[in-house]
Amino acid sequence: IIYAGSKCRKFKTFRTSRDEIVIEIADSLNPSMEAMEAERVVRALEERLVFRDDKIRAQEAPLPSMTYPAAVNLIIAGILRAASNVQDVEVRAFGSSANGFGDASSDVDVVLAATRTNLVQGLELGPNGLVDLAPRVLRKLERRLQMQGFKILQRILHARVPILKMSMVLPSGKALECDLSVNNLLPVFNTKLLKTYAEINPHVVDLVQTCKEWAKEHGVHGAARGHLSSYAFTLMVIFFLQIRGDLPCLQGDAESKPEWYIEDQKKYNVYIDETSDFSEFADRNMSTFADFIRFYRNEFRWGEWVVSIRTGKCLSLKKYPKLAKQPRSGVDPFELFYFIHIEDPFDIQRNLHCVLGPHKNQKLWDAFESTPTVRRWRNRGYGGY
């Protein structure tokens, strides 16, 4: 992506399928430069890619700031020490251990964030360091992590998102497991969104915990087993409370006030309303778990509507043109007519039903159909009639 040999010091525009990539070329490039020097210049320019939108003035979103539990802070501190040679490195937690919906059994998901150039230089990855960057970073960090008290449990380096599975013994003597990835930052924004909902109305946490308990009891929980994930059930609960008026929609102004995050050449609008006064929702706890069951059994139109906390409305599938519709292979064509659709609030092409195996949507529907709505669920504020 280089306008080589020019004297241009302004902007050179290159078109991709949807976006314009604007590269500011600070110095003219000499076509006869050595290959290694040319590659260095290319990498420097790539680090300065700036995405513009012709239709709206988009604000580039910084990584959200959050407070974490003490145990999570210990994990983060240890990883930062291991990566101390990397300039401007950050470590963020995401998932249930950080979003307010977890419990004592929740593992910790953490991501190491730094520019590619700083990772290569700080960890001395060599001239080919940018190739398979994440796996190479994780391999290089292993020894340093072990010196900080981490035990390496498993290396999953060839997945779409490479991770190191580790554990650390806390001062209490308990071993806490964690998964470390590199520059996998979109989940950090999802975590901030869910945490904000939990802070607006803490009762949503009780209902989500009850929902997970119910899903496990009925054998419809766990993406690894072809069922919906905890994240998907959390979105279902938040959407239900939005429809009942117990939670607001934090992304209602996203189109008029976009904040863009860019990852893997994709652009995500990660706007979250953090300025409005939502205090009126703090004590709204009239919606019960029984009502949640009744909503998805009697009111929600499976196969026609979309669970979308981004819109917070019961809208037709046609209103979500970017949402992937096709489930995984092996699903019976008849089952497609009432397949549940759950939109990721930021990655709006992603349909969280993608993990459902054959007949698992039917099993989920049967769980809603067979659950009595007069049962009082123990230890949860949302039980009852």
Image: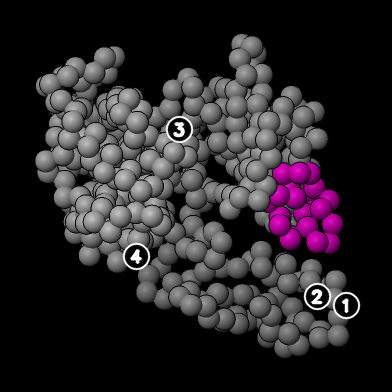
Using the rendered image of the protein, determine whether residue 251 is visible from the camera's viewpoint.
no
Q: How many neighbours does mark 1 have within 10 angstroms: few (below 14), some (14-19), or many (20 or more)?
A: few
Please say if the residues under marks 1 and 2 sit with CB atoms less than 8 Å apart: yes
Question: Is residue 131 part of the magenta span, yes or no?
Answer: yes
Please say if the residues under marks 1 and 4 sit with CB atoms less than 8 Å apart: no
Q: Select label 4 or label 2 by which is in front.
A: 4
Residue at (81, 86) in percent of width and height:
31
Per the image, label 4 sits on a secondary structure element best described as loop
Of labels 2 and 3, earlier in sequence is 2
Instruction: Between residue 368 and residue 35, name the one nearer to us.
Output: 368
310 left or right of 132 in image: left
Please say if the residues under marks 3 and 1 sit with CB atoms less than 8 Å apart: no
Residue at (48, 74) in percent of width and height:
19
Residue at (53, 81) in percent of width and height:
15
Question: What is the x, y in percent for residue 325?
Answer: 32, 61
Q: How many neighbours does mark 2 have within 10 angstroms: few (below 14), some (14-19), or many (20 or more)?
A: some
**The quarter of the displayed image where residue 9 is located:** bottom right
Instruction: Between residue 362 and residue 151, name the one nearer to us.
Output: 362
Instruction: Give the spatial CA distance, label 4 vs label 3.
Output: 27 Å
Question: Label 3 belongs to which residue?
Answer: 96
Question: What is the x, y in percent for residue 14?
Answer: 57, 81
Question: Which residues fall within the magenta stretch?
Answer: 120-140
Question: Label 2 belongs to which residue?
Answer: 38
Question: Label 1 belongs to which residue?
Answer: 34
Question: Is residue 11 part of the magenta span, yes or no?
Answer: no
Question: Label 4 belongs to which residue?
Answer: 322
